[in-house]
Image (tube, helix red, strand yellow):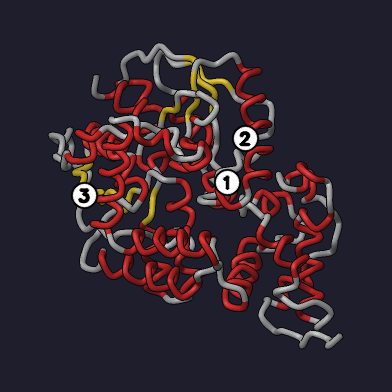
Amino acid sequence: MTQPEPMSIFDADQLAACVQCGFCLSSCPTYETTYLEEHGPRGRILAMRLVEEGELAIDDPDVVDSMETCVQCRACEVVCPSLVEFGSLMETARAAINEQQPPAGAEGRAQEVLFLGLKHRWLLRAGTILLALAQTLRLDRVLPERLRPARRVRLGDTLKGYRLPPPGAPIRGDAFLFRGCVMDGMFRDVHRATAQVLAAVGYRPRFEPAPPCCGALSAHAGRESEAHAMAEATIAAYAGTTGPILVNSAGCGGSMKEYGTLLGTEEARAFSARVKNLAELVTPEEVAARGSDVPLTLAYQAPCHLKNVQGLAEQSRALVAAIPGLTLIEPDDEQQCCGSGGIYSYLQPAFGDAMLARKDASFQRTGADGVVSANPGCAMQIARKGWETHHPAQLLARSLTP
């Protein structure tokens, strides 16, 4: 058997930084599912080292399984004493695998259609309208349960445009609401609520410019050049504007805040500094002082990229907890991943279902009536278990603009 050639594709310093201590294992949702080393960060980094040394090929079936089963929640980074940038290593691995072994067959064709839609807003919009029609006529029931979105998309909502709410006073300046792809297609109600919140605290919300996609899903899927192109197009779209760029999708926000690292340019770093979450523009004090009662009891779910990438889980929780009349309960699962991971739950259903089952059990133990989540993938994944999900912007809008 021919020995694989060494591949210098990984950051050698990052690989060397891992001391194989194992602190990451209990934070890893895939390791917690199988308890196999190859499904934990330590085993995955070991596999990367073996690829670098030529002991294994990047497209070896065991290597591919190890890398493709990672949900990229990046919880391991938070607990790593050596500060290994595991997310960057994983994106490098996915890109190398995708180059050597691109998705084929029906799965490959489905991914090509999906990523084509992310690049062209009109295609995604047409698909969302068709989904809304199918759900209205109950034609979506012909789809396999796994491919049937749990979130109901109202046809009127997809056809309705965006109208700017009247600004509050004093005006703090423009805030540009990043519409994105999935959020713009299926969560327009969240965008409208976000604009209401911004206006209520004195910002002038703007829905334009509207680049079609931030590139996060492409980066996670190993489509490196595509992710770079989308990042550059997003930055270019906001050229000539000033003020914060408000991103209400945790995954998109995490990706856009790392454009500086992804592209390595001063322009990208300056752009990333403008990317903000609602918790960075609205204070709990404002909400507590001005908000009206929202009598709900909800469990708080911190999306992985809000917690582990943006580091804003506690700030977001405090903002929602400040809403008068709202009871917010913290689940006891240490906020592990729900198994969504973009399209991960479709590509790795066994792992996705196992993570969702653990997440559902932790919600059940809270006794809450619903769930707060600030990420579209998480909201759709959690809804599969029958939970009513609320975006923080919707709760804030209900309180600040009753």
Amino acid type at image mark 1: Ser
| Residue 159, position as x, y percentages in the image | 18, 40
For label 2, the SS is helix
Q: Residue at x 39, y 27 (%)?
A: 285
Tally of marks: 3
Please identify the quadrant where the N terminus is shown. bottom right
Amino acid type of the residue tagged 3 in the rendering: Phe
Q: Position of residue 377 (x, y in %)?
A: 48, 43
The one of 87 and 213 positioned closer to us in this rendering:
213
- Any mark on residue 356, and which? 2
Marks 3 & 1, CB-CB < 8 Å contact: no
- Image coordinates of residue 149 in percent, x first then y, are 43, 38
> From the image, which quarter does the C terminus lie in?
top left
Q: Which mark, residue 398?
A: none
Are the residues flagged by discs 2 and 1 in contact, CB closer than 8 Å? yes
The mark found on residue 345 in the picture is 1
**For the residue carrying disc 3, how many other residues have a C-alpha within 10 Å: few (<14), some (14-19), or many (20+)?**
some
| x and y, in percent, of residue 268 in the image | 40, 70
Q: Is residue 305 above or below residue 361?
A: below
- When the figure is inspected, residue 367 is found, relative to residue 284, above or below; the finding is above
Residue at horizontal 36 percent and vertical 31 percent from the top:
152
Find the distance from the CA under tag 2 to the CA under tag 3: 33 Å
Side (left or right) of 348 relative to 138: right
Q: Residues within 10 Å of mark 1 (few under 14, many from 20)?
A: many
User: In the image, what residue type sits under mark 2?
Assistant: Leu
Label 2 Cα crowd, 10 Å radius (few <14 / some 14-19 / many 20+): many
In the figure, residue 376 lies in which quadrant? top left
Mark sitting on residue 207: 3
Camera-nearest residue between 158 and 319: 158
